[in-house]
Image (cartoon, helix red, strand yellow):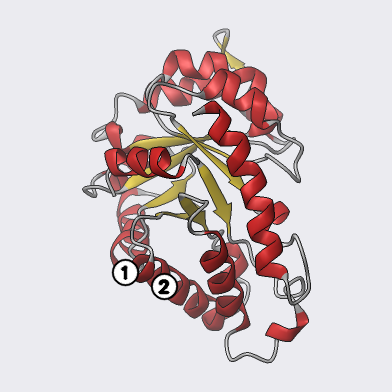
Amino acid sequence: MTTELLVAEIKRKKSFLCIGLDVDISKIPPHLLDKEDPIFEFNKAIIDATHHIAVSYKPNTAFYEAYGIKGWLSLQKTIEYLNTKYPEIFTIADAKRGDIGNTSTMYAKAFFEDLSFDSVTVAPYMGQDSVEPFLAFKDKHTIMLALTSNKGAFDFQTKKINDIEVYKHVLETSKSWENSENLMYVVGATKAEYFTEIRKIVPNSFLLVPGVGAQGGSLNEVCKYGLNSQIGLLINSSRGIIYASNGIDFATKAQEAALILQQEMAAFL
């Protein structure tokens, strides 16, 4: 999917909501456990109830890999369902991959070619040659960790090298990489005070923003400092939406929770 199509979908739905499909089988409604594939049935119901509200879905692959081949098949069925029934949706494989060049190429093929995701998250610690293989794919996006929402972000990301924070080095350096126009960045909502500085470095890039909701991030603060002329934000909410209820009405309650966020976003558009 091109950035232009993503922006058009955001404007059409008046939403920049991304829903995280982080499925813990111990938390899904008990009545689904009798299904052949409870994880996929859960995802399908959430997607059908919220597809008109969200512009993106983000399965975190750890929540599928934890269940072995069955979990991976659930992930495959989920992305196939999205691509077939709702092709206008921007899909994100939250995999946080990053390795030497030839290995990164294989990771990129797995998510972009085999599973047909629109984007994948990557870790930049190994540098340019670990990220550029992802950037080589046409109309695919690489979402690089920049400033994350967890408390451990302060261990390295905000430390200074020659009076410049590491996350700023990461952002600035990545702009020089081949096909860097295909880059997006992860910036946590719990770090809203940093968005002004981030926008000075990457004013036109899309930012994937986790941490709104269960982690305590403020949508208002993120939008105040993070929005650009093309919106430029994908706000992710996972637990606050998909686990809004553990009953028969779980999909309806997820829709209601998603709608609350969407209506707040519409005010900014």
Picture quadrant of residue 211: top right
- Please say if 43 is above or below 185: below
Along the viewing direction, whichever of 115 and 257 lies nearer the viewer? 257
- Drawn side of residue 179 relative to residue 48, left or right: left
Nearest to the observer: residue 21 or residue 253: 253
Please tell me which of labels 2 and 1 falls first in the chain: 2
Instruction: Name the residue carrying label 1.
Output: 114
Percent across and percent down for residue 216 are 76, 37
Disc 1 crowd rating (10 Å Cα; few below 14, some 14-19, many 20+) is few
C-alpha distance separating marks 2 and 1: 14 Å
- The x and y percentages for residue 112 are 32, 59
- Amino acid type of the residue that numbered disc 1 sits on in the rendered structure: Asp
Q: Give coordinates of residue 168: x percent, y percent.
A: 51, 19
Which of the two residues, 127 or 200, is positioned nearer the viewer here?
Answer: 200
Residue at position x 34%, y 70% in the image: 84
Q: Residue furthest top?
A: 163
Q: Is mark 2 on a helix, strand or loop?
A: helix
* Residue type, mark 2 in image: Tyr
Coordinates of residue 225 in the picture (x, y in percent)? 57, 18
User: Could you say whether the residue bearing mark 1 is in a helix, strand or loop?
Assistant: helix
Residue at the spot of label 2: 81
Q: Is residue 113 left or right of residue 146?
A: left
Q: Nearer the viewer, mark 2 or mark 1?
A: 2
Q: Residue 199's mark?
A: none
Q: Residue at x 52, y 68 (%)?
A: 48
